[in-house]
Image (tube, grey):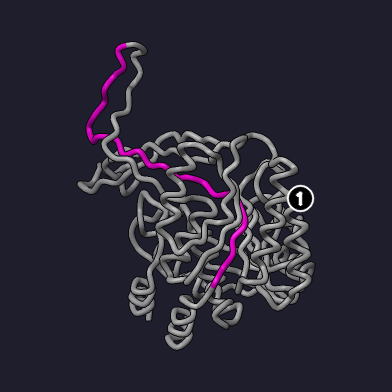
């Protein structure tokens, strides 16, 4: 359990922080279908989804940005690329609602803005297998439609991203790297950008460089690394996540974190045996989409506010325990919600 004094110290510090972010910025577009509507197309005989509400949100790198903004971080400085298209226009409109400096969001005519379009249908929830539907309802996501460029950044765009990362780094309290894509070198964090980030981490070891990579965590040899169990196992080539985490920490000489679902977060420092910081109990239905990004936001917030690695993991658990209870959306946690949740647990 994180102490109240440490909790308040973190929350007081956040408005004074400037945090940089590097990675792929997506548009999450939610299409809310008209309840009980099942209209068929005259031409095809297929169901024509009838939309009554469109809800846009920044996703991927934007999910971390949303979480940091909700917690109260003073300024966010992303370096990323999007397309010069309608999806990009809608995405920038959402980004500008946050405490963000958008000067390093590069609009590239040759790229598509990465977009997840998610049709959402309101359905009655079957709480338990074999039990009739309850009276409660929830939004269920149907088949997702994905838009993005299936190809690498150009050499010119890569050079510009590297230049921008180096330029902003000196002004930051910390840098978060969110390597979302699983196709090698198709995203913003390609091999060249990764090399620049590692060089910056080595050049200024006192500045936090926090790396969250879906598939290429093992390619990083500097910075504070974070993944879920399967990502850590793959990165370390180790079947046991705890041993794998210690191996990653030993490689970088920095702390490493592994989210372990409802169990909590594993932490290894200086290559030592991993310690489990237990998760906080929650009740009722959960939606784990974005839980890892919520944990990232909490861990980074804690570390930049002077918390120990274990305290930062506890704060990450606290934030994630709030967001997973927000159904049908990628949740966030405000300082007020964090205080209320801490009080409930205490």
In the rendered image, residue 9, in percent from the top left (x then y), is placed at 47, 85
Q: Which of the 4 image quarters holds residue 212?
A: bottom right
Secondary structure character of the magenta stretch overall: strand
Q: Which of the 4 image quarters holds residue 210?
A: bottom right
Q: Is residue 130 magenta?
A: no
Residue 331 or 154: which is nearer the viewer? 154
The residue labelled by disc 1 is 191
Residue 72 or 336: which is nearer the viewer? 72
Q: Is residue 39 magenta?
A: yes
Furthest toward the left, the residue is 135
Q: Is residue 165 visible?
A: yes
In the rendered image, residue 47, in percent from the top left (x then y), is placed at 33, 22
Numbered range of the magenta stretch = 18-42
Neighbor class of circle 1 (other Cα within 10 Å; few <14, some 14-19, many 20+) is: some
Residue in view at x 41 percent, y 42 percent: 29
Furthest toward the front, the residue is 103
């Amino acid at each position: 359990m994180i102490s109240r004094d440490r909790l308040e110290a973190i929350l007081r510090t956040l408005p004074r922080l400037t945090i940089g972010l590097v990675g792929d910025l997506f548009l999450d577009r939610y299409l809310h279908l008209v309840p009980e509507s099942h209209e068929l197309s005259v031409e095809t005989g297929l169901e024509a989804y009838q939309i009554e509400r469109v809800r846009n949100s920044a996703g991927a790198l934007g999910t971390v940005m949303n979480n940091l903004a909700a917690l109260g971080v003073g300024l966010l400085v992303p370096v990323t690329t999007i397309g010069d298209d309608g999806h990009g226009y809608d995405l920038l409109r959402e980004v500008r609602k946050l405490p963000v400096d958008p000067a390093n969001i590069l609009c590239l005519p040759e790229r598509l803005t990465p977009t997840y379009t998610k049709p959402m249908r309101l359905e009655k929830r079957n709480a338990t297998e074999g039990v009739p539907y309850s009276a409660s309802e929830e939004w269920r996501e149907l088949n997702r439609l994905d838009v993005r460029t299936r190809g690498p950044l150009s050499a010119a765009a890569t050079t510009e991203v590297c230049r921008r990362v180096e330029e902003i780094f000196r002004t930051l309290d910390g840098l978060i790297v969110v390597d979302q894509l699983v196709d090698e070198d198709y995203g913003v964090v390609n091999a060249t950008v990764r090399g620049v980030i590692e060089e910056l981490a080595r050049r200024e070891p006192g500045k936090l460089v926090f790396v969250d990579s879906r598939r290429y965590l093992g390619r990083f040899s500097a910075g504070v690394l974070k993944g879920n169990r399967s990502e850590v196992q793959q990165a370390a080539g180790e079947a046991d996540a705890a041993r794998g985490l210690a191996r990653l920490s030993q490689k970088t000489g920095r702390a490493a974190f592994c989210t372990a679902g409802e169990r909590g977060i594993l932490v290894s420092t200086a290559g030592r045996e991993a310690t489990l910081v237990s998760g906080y109990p929650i009740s009722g239905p959960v939606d784990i989409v974005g839980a890892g990004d919520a944990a990232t936001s909490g861990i980074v917030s804690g570390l930049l506010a002077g918390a120990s690695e274990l305290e930062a993991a506890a704060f990450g658990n606290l934030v994630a325990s709030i967001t997973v209870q927000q159904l049908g959306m990628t949740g966030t946690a405000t300082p007020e919600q964090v205080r209320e949740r801490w009080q409930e647990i205490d």
